[in-house]
Amino acid sequence: MNAKVRILLVDDEEPFVMNLSRLLQNRNFEVVTALDGFEALAAMRGAPAFDVAVLDVKMPGMDGMATLKALKKLSPQTEVIMLTGHATLKSGIQAIREGAFDFLMKPCDIEDLTTKIREAYDVETMRRHPVLWPRNKVAEIIHCTFERLAPDDRLADALEVFNEENGARAAETAYILDS
């Protein structure tokens, strides 16, 4: 990867932010930190666009969902990875609907997080410059194989949450990506 990926790291736990920032910088990422949603939005306004934002869900003041919405309004091309220790299926679905690239649980393995950051960066870069990418790479993101969800599968709960929120508009098919 030639270009340094610019990351905005947002979490209200300062020791966690400082440690994760150092780990990401050691992996050749450019990292800017913020300790709450308001600080994150100020950083977005005062700097060149970020490629990826890693955003905590539970924060005092402006929570992660509100920050996600505001961030996507300011910079729709910035991919957002939600990172939380308080995840529910419902909050994960809501985050994806609001434009999050992915939703990960804390504690998260640093290698898993860096892989997700690189995937988000690749998607963001392809959207900006689609002709610069090999067709097979773009196809990997657009096309993937699907398996039907068995009625007794625990992931069937996702359909119930989806149907609760969408009522009659709910789709008959759900695609759940597992990496």
Image (cartoon, helix red, strand yellow):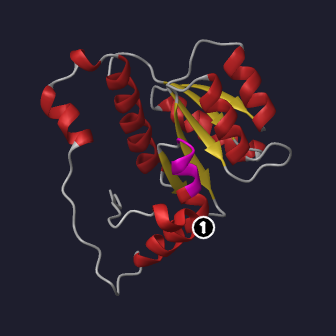
Question: Which residues fall within the magenta stretch?
Answer: 94-99
In the figure, 76 relative to 11: above or below? Answer: above
Q: Which of the 4 image quadrants contains residue 10?
A: top right
Residue 32 screen position, x and y as percent: 64, 25
Q: Is residue 98 magenta?
A: yes
Q: Is residue 85 left or right of residue 108?
A: right
Q: Residue at x 32, y 56 (%)?
A: 179
54 or 166: which is nearer to us?
166
Residue type at the position of mark 1: Thr
Q: Residue at x 46, y 23 (%)?
A: 5
Q: Which of the 4 image quadrants contains residue 119?
A: top left
**Magenta: main secondary structure:** helix
Residue 144 screen position, x and y as percent: 21, 50
Q: Which of the 4 image quadrants contains residue 41?
A: top right
The quarter in which the N terminus is drawn is top left
Number of numbered discs: 1
Q: Is residue 5 magenta?
A: no
Q: Is residue 132 left or right of residue 46?
A: left
Q: Is residue 149 left or right of residue 61?
A: left
Q: Residue at x 18, y 56 (%)?
A: 145
**Which SS class for mark 1?**
loop
What residue sits right under mark 1 in the picture? 88
